[in-house]
Amino acid sequence: IEVSYRTKVKASERRKITSSKDAESIFREIWSSSMEFKEEFYIILLNRANQVLGWYKVSEGGMSGTVVDPKLIFSIALKGLSSSIIICHNHPSSNLKPSNEDINLTKRLKQAGELLEIPVLDHLILTTDGCYSFGDEGMI
């Protein structure tokens, strides 16, 4: 096992997230070219000032879902020295409405984050045409 922390961006040059639109912009920059073909799940790691420390692709699935392991998400957040995270997945169907599974996963991850003192600040659902923010909708 090797645990290491390396940064390539100076602290003064880190992007700051102040809204769901800021997070959406970053996720769209890092997303693969498969937005309409397969579901993927990413996280953004943030410091106390909500500056981006990094991002990680957690999983990649098929057209109707992907497996998300909370242990993996929070192991990355811990190794990345994150103070908080923002999570995101896409819906290849272009339907922005969160499924029951999306809602349940968000609740579980929020609870785990509270326990570890790494809050989940938002959960975004992306499509090629739009974005749904659990935070903006009062669901987190």
Image (spheres, grey):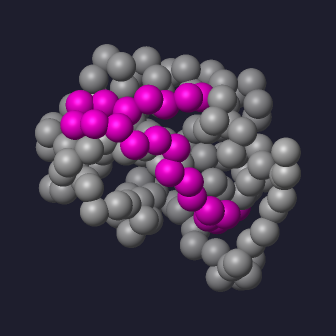
- In depth, the one of 30 and 47 nearer the eye is 30
* Nearer-the-camera pick, 129 or 16: 129
Q: Is residue 55 placed above or below 61 in the rendered structure? A: below
Is 67 in the magenta?
yes
Question: Residue 40's spot in the image, x, y percent?
Answer: 37, 44
Residue drawn at (37%, 60%) of the image: 31
Look at 61% across and 38% down and name the residue there: 73
Q: Position of residue 118 (x, y in %)?
A: 71, 39
- The answer to whether residue 8 is left or right of residue 62 is right
* Relative image position of residue 28 (x, y in whole percent): 35, 63
Residue at 57%, 58% in the rendered image: 55
> Was residue 9 drawn as part of the magenta stretch in this picture?
no
Q: Residue furthest front?
A: 1
38 on left or right of 40: left
Is 107 located above or below residue 3 in the figure?
Answer: above
Magenta region: which residues?
A: 49-70
